[in-house]
Amino acid sequence: MTVPLKRWLVVGFALAAAFVALGLGVARHPLTLDSQVASALHGVYTQPLGKAAEIGSDVLGPVLPWILGVALVALALRQRQHTGLCVRLAVVLVLCRLTSLAFKPLFLRERPRDYPDLSYPSGHVTSVASTGFVLVLLCAWLWPRLVKRVALASAVAVVLSALCRVLLGVHWVSDTIGAVLAVTGVGLLSACALRLLPPGDGRSLDG
C-alpha cells in the first residue's frame, strides 16, 4: 500500500465519521445555523426566487447520476479498453448515491417544513456530489488536464444544488453539508478499494 493511498483512506474514514457524527448531532435538534437560515428564508419557496430554485433543483438533482451512468456505458461500449475502468466508476457512483437512501432511515430527521421523505442527508445534493466525484475520477484517469476544471464545475454545481434545496425550505443547511461529507467519504473509500486511487493512465485496470 502506497503512502498516498493510506492518506486517501484516512481522509475517507474521517469524512465518513464526520457525516455520521453530524447526522446524530442534528437528528433531534437543528443547529443554530439551520434554524437561523430556515427562519430567514421562511416562505421564500412561494416567491419567484423559490420558483427559480425549483427549476434549478430539477436540473441539479437525481437525474444526473443516471445521465452519467448512461455515459459510462456508452464509453465502455465505444472504447472497450476502458470497460474495467467504467465498471469500477459505476460502482463508486452507485455507492455514493446510496448514502442518502441508506442513511435517511437511520437518522429519521424531519424537514424544515411539511414535505415527503426524510431530510438528512439531502438526496439532491448527494446526487450532484456523486456525479461530480465520479467525473473527477474519470478525468483523472483519462483526461488529467480537465481535472481542475471539472472539479471546480462540480463544486459550483454542488453549492447551487444545496442553495436551491435550502431556498425551497425542504432541507436544513446541515443536510447539504452531510451529503457532501457522505459522498466524499464513501467515494474515497470505495475508490481506494476498487484501485481507482491514486489514478493512473487508465490502462492498468483493464489489462
Image (cartoon, rainbow, N blue to C red):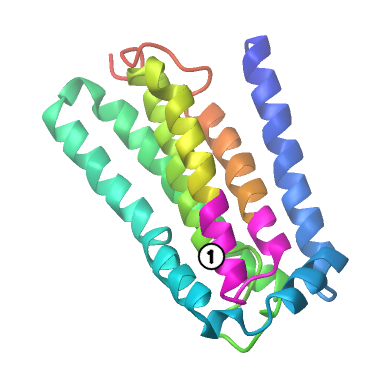
In the figure, residue 172 lies in which quadrant? bottom right
Q: Secondary structure at mark 1?
A: helix
Q: Residue furthest bottom?
A: 114
First to last magenta residue range: 159-178
Res. 116 in view: no
Is residue 151 rendered to the left or right of residue 36? left
Is residue 76 rendered to the left or right of residue 41? left
Which quadrant is home to the N terminus? top right
* Residue appearing at x 68%, y 19% in the figure: 6
Q: Which residue is mark 1?
A: 164
Which quadrant is home to the C terminus? top left
Say which amino acid is labelled 1.
Answer: Cys
Q: Residue 108, percent across and down?
A: 70, 76
Considering depth in this image, is 166 or 26 the residue closer to the camera? 166
Q: Residue 28, percent across and down?
A: 83, 76
Give the prevailing secondary structure in the magenta stretch: helix
Is 32 colored magenta in this rendering? no
Res. 17 in view: yes
Using the image, determine if residue 108 lies above or below residue 64: below
Q: Residue 9, percent across and down?
A: 67, 28
* Residue appearing at x 52%, y 82% in the figure: 47
* Residue appearing at x 57%, y 85% in the figure: 115
In the figure, residue 186 lies in which quadrant? top right
Is residue 143 rendered to the left or right of residue 17? left
